[in-house]
Image (cartoon, helix red, strand yellow):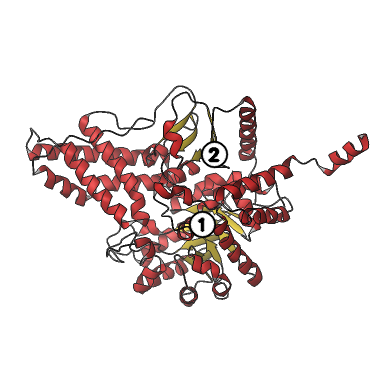
């Protein structure tokens, strides 16, 4: 994939500040319109991501910054570059969700500068034949519109498993391996095999390796084409497969892909671009829409997950040194309890107006006292089922006490991995640590699973780990009773679960926990599952014995 545009020269403009301002305004508007149009064509989660990018190009603070730089005699290209770079550094300093948007901001900047220069924006090549796309990273605007008939797989040298690139690739059903630093050394024409299940990229594969890969592709195609049905193991143990959704508009697509409900409905989209907290009535309309899409089925709604890492002027926009460990999630909502009360009230009213099975949960719960506070308040306001997200090691280690009060737990593997391994999930430099296969993370999942089983409380997985088919089986073996993921991953996970019994899933969990690293755990489970799948059936064994 082509390299980014070079940094614009910092030379004085030959035009007036007004003329340069008109150029900058026209390019910013054109790029915003183009990104928004891409979102409309892509639909689904990509639409939400690209809508946020379009707002970046229209941000009045950035526009004012550009105007100020033009007044010093800079060109529009240089002023845009510097303004976006300054805003990017600020977002990175905030960390968390806002840090994640820094990469998106780079893409907008590149597109605006390209428009000003009259050259194509860096993007995805369009060869005539199918290909594996290799890039340092991929902008959401490009990922959202990848041609599924051409792009066989995606490899990036930067980013982690929870980056927008990885999430949107999974949503489109594209095999993707991210954070592979040696990928920058690949050249056009190099043959490769990309295996998302093992997280590996094989260079110069042998004929045998190619044959095995083609067989796996055919098997995956058959599984995806198979009729949808409830999630279950080979022995009939039911494992409901739910969808992670970011807006009510995505509900219909999730139903089409066989989602049995919603395991994570993110409500941030109602708040992030608002100047004041939405009213109870405004919120209720959105909640009713998603509940009506799943009549009688479970819908788990996460209350506002915001704070210093997702600054909101009406919640908390005070800068913090380390926002990932700061006033976020439930902590921020407790400091502004009326916002939480309004959201829970809106959810209770939506529940009363629909034939739903509404569950609510709080993010960033780290103590038993926080769990009691939230569940008691939710019950007080009329909600029947209230639980917590387990994203912090302390809540996993005290899961038996937390689940004594909470009605359920949902494990957010993205943050749980980040906090367990002390590796910011948005930093490419520590991406190898952001691996939910790590035995330390799996041990914490097992603690929650065991507590849930002992107390008869459901334990779900709503992090990206649930979208990894083989890891999904391990998570069930650790005690997960439901799995929630991007709708595009449902077919693969459903097919994988059907291959194994609950006893075998528990055996895989034991194998993974005995490993010393994520790579060892993944390889050990892969070998154990292959041994089961390739073993002769009892009938074949008896026949072979008779012949001998």
Say which mark, if any, is on residue 304: none
Is the residue marked by circle 1 packed among few (<14), some (14-19), or many (20+) residues within 10 Å? many
Secondary structure category for the residue under label 2: strand
Q: Could you say whether the residue bearing mark 1 is in a helix, strand or loop?
A: helix
Q: Nearer the viewer, residue 344 or 308?
A: 308
- Is 30 situated left or right of 382 in this image? left
- Asked if residue 312 lies left or right of residue 117, the reply is right
Left or right: 4 in relation to 330: left
Judge by depth and name the residue closer to the eye, 108 or 31.
108
Instruction: Please give the count of numbered marks on the rendered protein.
Output: 2
Residue 9: x %, y % from top left:
17, 34
Looking at the image, which residue is at 54% across and 42% down?
Answer: 199
Residue 151 percent location from the top left of the image? 48, 31
**Vertical comparison of 429 with 345: above or below:** above
Query: Residue extending furthest top?
Result: 128
Identified at 26% across, 53% down, the residue is: 90
Q: Quadrant of residue 120?
A: top left
Whether residue 329 is visible: yes
Question: Which callout, 1 or 2, points to the residue nearer the camera?
Answer: 2
Quadrant placement of the N terminus = top left
The residue nearer to you, when weighing 246 against 105, is: 105
Real-space Cα separation, disc 1 to disc 2, in angstroms: 21 Å
Q: Which residue is mark 1?
A: 413
> Dot 2 corresponds to which residue?
200
Q: Is residue 194 above or below residue 350?
A: above
Q: Quadrant of the C terminus?
A: top right
Choose top left, top right, bottom left or bottom right for residue 217: top right
Q: Position of residue 504 (x, y in %)?
A: 71, 53
**First in sequence: mark 1 or mark 2?**
2
Q: Position of residue 22 (x, y in %)?
A: 14, 38
Instruction: Tell me the quarter of the picture where residue 11 sits.
Output: top left
Q: Residue at x 58, y 58 (%)?
A: 442
């Amino acid at each position: 994939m082509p390299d980014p545009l070079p940094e614009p020269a910092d030379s004085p403009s030959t035009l007036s500040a007004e003329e340069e301002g008109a150029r900058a305004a026209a390019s910013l508007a054109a790029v915003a319109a183009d990104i928004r149009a891409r979102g409309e064509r892509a639909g689904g989660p990509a639409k939400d991501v690209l809508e946020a990018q379009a707002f970046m190009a229209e941000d009045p603070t950035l526009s004012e910054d550009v105007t100020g730089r033009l007044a010093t005699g800079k060109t529009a290209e240089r002023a845009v570059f510097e303004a976006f770079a300054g805003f990017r550094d600020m977002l990175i300093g905030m960390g968390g969700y806002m840090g994640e948007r820094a990469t998106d901001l780079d893409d907008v900047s590149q597109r605006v500068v390209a428009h000003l220069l009259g050259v194509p924006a860096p993007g995805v090549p369009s060869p005539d034949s199918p290909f594996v796309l290799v890039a340092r990273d991929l902008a959401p605007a490009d990922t959202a519109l990848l041609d599924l008939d051409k792009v066989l797989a995606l490899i990036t040298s930067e980013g982690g498993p929870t980056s927008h690139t990885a999430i949107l690739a999974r949503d489109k059903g594209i095999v993707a391996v991210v954070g592979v630093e040696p990928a920058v050394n690949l050249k056009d024409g190099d043959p490769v095999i990309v295996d998302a299940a093992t997280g590996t990229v094989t260079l110069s594969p042998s004929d045998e390796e190619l044959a095995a890969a083609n067989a796996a592709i055919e098997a995956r195609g058959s599984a995806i084409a198979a009729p949808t049905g409830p999630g279950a193991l080979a022995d009939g143990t039911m494992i409901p497969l739910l969808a992670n959704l970011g807006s009510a508009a995505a509900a219909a697509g999730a139903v089409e892909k066989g989602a049995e409900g919603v395991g994570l409905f993110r409500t941030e989209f109602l708040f992030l671009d608002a100047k004041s907290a939405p009213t109870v009535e405004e919120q209720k309309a959105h909640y009713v829409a998603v509940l009506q899409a799943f009549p009688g089925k479970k819908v788990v709604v996460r209350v506002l997950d915001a704070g210093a890492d997702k600054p909101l002027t009406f919640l908390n926009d005070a800068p913090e040194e380390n926002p990932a460990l700061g006033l976020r999630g439930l902590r921020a909502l407790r400091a502004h309890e009326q916002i939480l009360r309004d959201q829970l009230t809106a959810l209770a009213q939506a529940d009363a107006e629909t034939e739903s099975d509404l569950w609510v949960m709080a993010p960033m719960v780290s103590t038993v006292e926080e769990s009691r506070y939230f569940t008691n308040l939710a019950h007080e306001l009329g909600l029947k089922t209230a639980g917590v997200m387990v994203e912090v090691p302390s809540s996993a280690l005290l899961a038996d006490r937390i689940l004594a009060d909470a009605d359920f737990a949902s494990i957010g593997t993205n943050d749980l991995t980040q906090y367990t391994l002390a590796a910011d999930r948005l930093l490419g430099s520590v991406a190898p640590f952001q691996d939910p296969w790590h035995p330390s993370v799996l041990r914490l999942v097992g603690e929650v699973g065991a507590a849930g089983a002992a107390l008869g409380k459901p334990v779900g997985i709503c992090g990206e780990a649930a979208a990894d088919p083989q890891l999904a089986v391990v998570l069930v073996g650790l005690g997960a009773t439901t799995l929630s993921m991007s709708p595009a991953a449902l077919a693969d996970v459903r097919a994988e679960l059907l291959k194994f019994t609950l006893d075998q899933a528990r055996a895989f969990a034991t194998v993974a926990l005995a490993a010393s690293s994520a790579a060892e755990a993944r390889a050990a489970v892969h070998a154990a599952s292959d041994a089961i799948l390739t073993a002769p059936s009892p009938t074949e064994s008896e026949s072979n014995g008779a012949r001998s």
